[in-house]
Image (tube, helix red, strand yellow):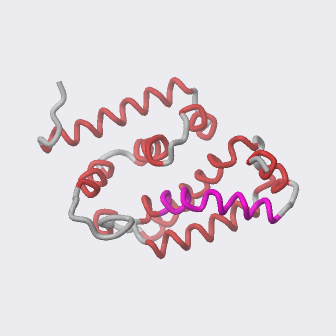
Amino acid sequence: MSEKMLVRNAIKGNEEAFLALIHSYEDVLYRTAISYLKNEGDALEAIQEVTYRAFKSIKTVKEPAYFKTWLIRIMMNYCQDVIKKSKREVLGERIFCIQGMSEDFTFLEVEEALLSLSDYERELLHLKYFEDVKIKDIAVMWDTPEGTIKTRLHKALRALRAGFEEKGEVKRV
């Protein structure tokens, strides 16, 4: 069964279709949660909570093609709420690598550079490059013109690049 049909069935109340959708996006939800919360336990709890919230509000999905975007947005909002409530110091709770320990500290350098950006820029880069969400879908999700998203994405990348250049790690001509 196609994804659109699963979404339509889930909107109509089919629990099996909803569970199939959640299972197909489990990795995406986990990566999104871990990138925000930096803790496996919190990420798993976030998946549970987002699954519950999505189930409760599945009838609000207007366009089945944007289900993935809608689901990721719920996760991002939940993670931001958790961070605000706990007032964590994000720098103090880093993870070395999602799959395990690694001697390659590039991951930490990229994370540190991302933390120098605004929440909006981080979210935009996360959606585009970590979750591979299309600019068109981001524009719909944020109710913003595609051209504006492209401009903001370009500015975020430029700010990220500038952060690396300050450290002397990347030289662009």
User: Between residues 29 and 70, which one lies in front from this camera angle?
Assistant: 29
Q: Nearer the viewer, residue 99 or 133?
A: 99
Which quarter of the rendered picture does the C terminus lie within?
A: top left
Furthest toward the left, the residue is 168
Question: Considering depth in this image, is 168 or 23 the residue closer to the camera?
Answer: 23
Report the predominant secondary structure element of the magenta stretch. helix
Residue at position x 11%, y 41% in the image: 168
Q: Position of residue 47 (x, y in %)?
A: 58, 67
Name the residue furthest bottom: 41
Quarter location, residue 37 = bottom left
Query: Foreground residue, 29 or 141?
Result: 29
Q: Which residues are magenta?
A: 15-33
> What residue is shown at x 62% (from left), y 46% (from top)?
69
Residue at horizontal 86 percent and vertical 60 percent from the top = 13
Give the side of residue 141 with respect to residue 154, left or right: right
- In the image, is residue 118 above or below residue 157? below
Asked if the magenta segment contains residue 154, the reply would be: no
User: Going by the image, does 62 lie left or right of 50?
Assistant: right
Residue at the image position 29 percent from the left and 36 percent from the top: 159
Residue 154 location in percent, x, y? 38, 29
Query: Which of the 4 image quarters holds residue 157?
Result: top left
Q: Is residue 138 above or below residue 82?
A: above
Q: Is residue 147 left or right of residue 165?
A: right
Q: Position of residue 100 (x, y in %)?
A: 34, 70
Residue furthest out toward the right = 12
Tell whether position 17 is magenta.
yes
Task: Measuring from the top left, give residue 167's x and y in whole percent.
Answer: 14, 44
Residue reaching furthest to the front: 1
Q: Is residue 111 above or below residue 64?
A: below
